[in-house]
Amino acid sequence: MTDPIVIVSPCFNENTTVIKFLIELEQVLAGSDKNFVVVVVDDASIDNTLALLRNHAFTIKNAVLKVITLKYNLGHQGAIYQGIAYARTLGAQNVIVMDADGEDDPLAVLELTKFQNQEVDIVNVVRGKRKEKLSFRVFYQIYKVIFYLITNRSMNFGNYCMINRKIIDATVEKSFIHFAAHLSKLKAKTAKISFDRRSRIDGKSKMNLDSLIHHAFKSFIEYAENLLMVFLKLFLLISLVIVVLTLYVVYQKMFTNNAILGWASTISATFINTALICLGFFVMGILLLNIMAKNSSQHRDNLYKEIN
């Protein structure tokens, strides 16, 4: 018998949505020949989500439902980390991470499990069509372009994926701020499948434009070194322009009778200020990296409590 696949699903104030998700997921898992442990991570919900989860159980033989609740709200990414950390204590060899609001299609689980015994470390579910508003989709495309320019990697997937034991250990030991960006950094064998992003089972999506911007910032922090190199290259480029402009002004003043136009001084001052700003970002970034390096050496505590 193969080891059970652990499915980690974070949730916060999902109310009956998470129960509907679990019912649909159970129906999908019933058609699989694999064994599963479904871990719902309650991110310190303040509604009746946890009470509903306490009273819910699977009826199929190849899946077990476990619920853990966090000591305090850690946010979506923190809840994913705690779920993966808990899965490792269960001896999980494969973990699937998926949202509990129904936007991640449970049918993709059946496709992911086909990679269980293959030499693949990460299987990402690439997002097909999205159900969000046009403005959100436009900004999401802009974000992907910026992310690619900074990291030289495509961010066409989210948290929905399956990872093996090697990546589970690396994730728990190294920790992360942005799970998908963290995975994209790892030197690992990857594969992908494609599924459309569905609408929430009920209610509005919690990922709005503000959430997307915050999410983008977190992904860039995972690539802080790359971001710093962008500022450093920009600083060097502006410095070169300043040198050229300075030589031009000196040449005009020393070797010609031409008057120095006001725009030259204005542009020079502007470039100098921009260079100083870039240098300031670079220095602050170096300090931030040092802080992150120290924090990464200290493993996160387990902040969960098992409910059932």
Image: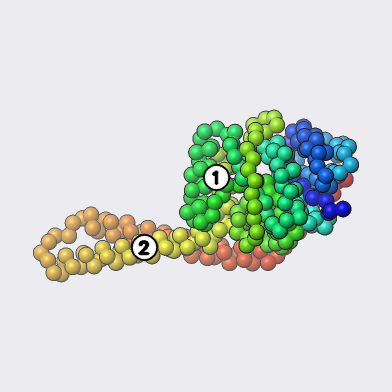
Q: Quadrant of the C terminus?
A: top right
Residue 42 left/right relative to 149? right
Residue 151 x/y as whole percent? 52, 57
Q: Nearer the viewer, residue 303 or 191?
A: 191
Q: Secondary structure at mark 1?
A: helix
Q: Nearer the viewer, residue 266 or 135?
A: 135
> Quick one: which residue is furthest to the bottom in this view?
254
Asked if residue 82 shows in the view, the reply is no
Look at the picture and state if 238 lies above or below 304: below
Quarter location, residue 204: top right
Residue, disc 2: 237
Q: Nearer the viewer, residue 44 or 245?
A: 245
Residue 284 x/y as whole percent? 51, 62
2 and 1 marks in contact (CB < 8 Å): no
Residue 64 left/right relative to 142? right
Residue, disc 1: 213
Q: How many marks?
A: 2
Q: Amino acid at mark 2?
A: Leu
Look at the picture and state if 70 lies above or below 231: above
**What residue is shown at x 77% (from left), y 47% (from top)?**
7
Q: Secondary structure at mark 2?
A: helix
**What residue is shown at x 32% (from left), y 56% (from top)?**
270
**What residue is shown at x 80% (from left), y 42% (from top)?**
32
Q: Earlier in the sequence, mark 2 or mark 1?
A: 1
Residue 76 x/y as whole percent? 68, 46
Asked if residue 40 shows in the view, the reply is yes
